[in-house]
Image (cartoon, rainbow, N blue to C red):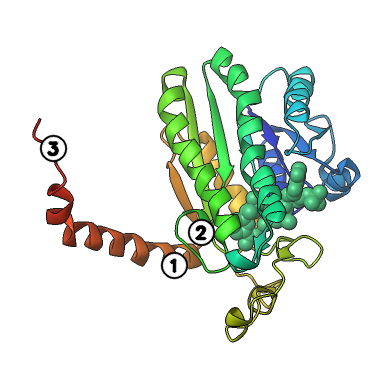
Amino acid sequence: MSKVWFITGAGSGIGAATARAALKAGDRVVATGRNLDKVRNALRDVAGTSLAFVQLDVANEDQARTAVAAAMRAFGRIDVAVNNAGYSLLGNFEELSTTDIERQISTNFHGVMYVMRAVLPVMRKQKSGRIINVSSVAGAVGLKHCGAYGAAKFAVEGLSLAVAHEVEPFGIKIVVVEPGFFRTDLLDAQNVKYGRSTIEDYAAEGSSEDMWSGYHGKQQGDPGKLGDVLVKIAWMDNPPKQFLAGSDALAVVKPILEGRLEELRAYEGLSKTTDGFF
Ligand SMILES: NC(=O)c1ccc[n+]([C@@H]2O[C@H](COP(=O)([O-])OP(=O)(O)OC[C@H]3O[C@@H](n4cnc5c(N)ncnc54)[C@H](OP(=O)(O)O)[C@@H]3O)[C@@H](O)[C@H]2O)c1
């Protein structure tokens, strides 16, 4: 049976590619975005009865509820919800403003939370569903300049891993996807936000903009291929809980996780000294 997808931030990059991959697989898609004209334009060539467009700024909880209701009116069910919408705030933590950090958390974490809250009652009633939450390598390990971005993505991972236990009895599985670098609009100057270089001590290291902007357009990952993999994952009975996408992601995360295990073993004795007497 074909599936119904609900995708946030479907107007570009991984979201648009996932919408295309799902349609190609014969599924139906509710493509959402805060700028609906942009989403319509991005998917114009695949428009048809299997594709519905719905307004959704993920930072707005009311819109999340309304968008899920609109998706239900369009196709009657939601089998796969992809929390993909997001942007990057990059810079040394001390040089980021609190307001900018709060905005980052609001879109990249609260947005996921709002959509999950809206979609879970639907999936519980159906007794089935998949939620695919797009995190990042920065949500798996600590990366320089990713204090705010990484905090939001780690929060997505924590929420996903915990809620997965609660909803598994209802046939719902949650997958966190941790992409490496993919050629999308994420690092486009119009979308990414950089902290301002205001503290002399950090100047010798160069600015975050100098470091990250050079990757734009040169990322090795193909969002189309990631879309195809997400379709595969959506069909799995036992999908991975945390999925690293791309060989660059593997190269960064694997040694750090192995190092964590080594550290855990090295301090095992000390950990046990804190045991109680009961
Ligand atoms: N590309 C990578 O290398 C990479 C690596 C790791 C993780 N990721 C994650 O992958 C996801 C998709 O990003 P992408 O790489 O495909 O970048 P992208 O091409 O810039 O796509 C991001 C999408 O999110 C949308 N969005 C941003 N804020 C939104 C909001 N408040 N409400 C609704 N939509 C919003 C954007 O829409 P607007 O046009 O309206 O801004 C855009 O369509 C993000 O969560 C990102 O953190 C990407």
Q: What is the secondary structure assignment of the residue under circle 1?
A: helix
Where's residue 98, x and y in %?
67, 54
Disc number for residue 276? 3
Q: Which amino acid does label 3 sit on?
A: Gly
Residue at 87% from the left image edge and 45% from the top image edge: 44
Disc number for residue 137? 2
Mark positioned earlier in the residue sequence (2 or 3): 2
Please rate how many residues cluster around mark 2, counting C-alpha atoms within 10 Å: few if below 14, some from 14 to 19, many from 20. Answer: many
Can the viewer see residue 270? yes
Residue at 87% from the left image edge and 48% from the top image edge: 38
Q: Which amino acid does label 2 sit on?
A: Val
Please rate how many residues cluster around mark 1, counting C-alpha atoms within 10 Å: few if below 14, some from 14 to 19, many from 20. Answer: some
> Along the horizontal axis of the image, is 66 left or right of 176?
right
> Along the horizontal axis of the image, is 48 left or right of 29?
right
Mark positioned earlier in the residue sequence (2 or 1): 2
Q: Give the position of the C terminus as an image quadrant.
A: top left
Where's residue 64, x and y in %?
73, 29
Where's residue 66, x and y in %?
78, 23
- Gap between marks 2 and 1, in whole Å? 8 Å
* Residue identifier under label 1: 252
Label 2 close to label 1 by CB (< 8 Å): yes
Q: Is mark 3 within 8 Å of ligand 1?
A: no
Q: In which quadrant of the rendered view does residue 60 lie? A: top right
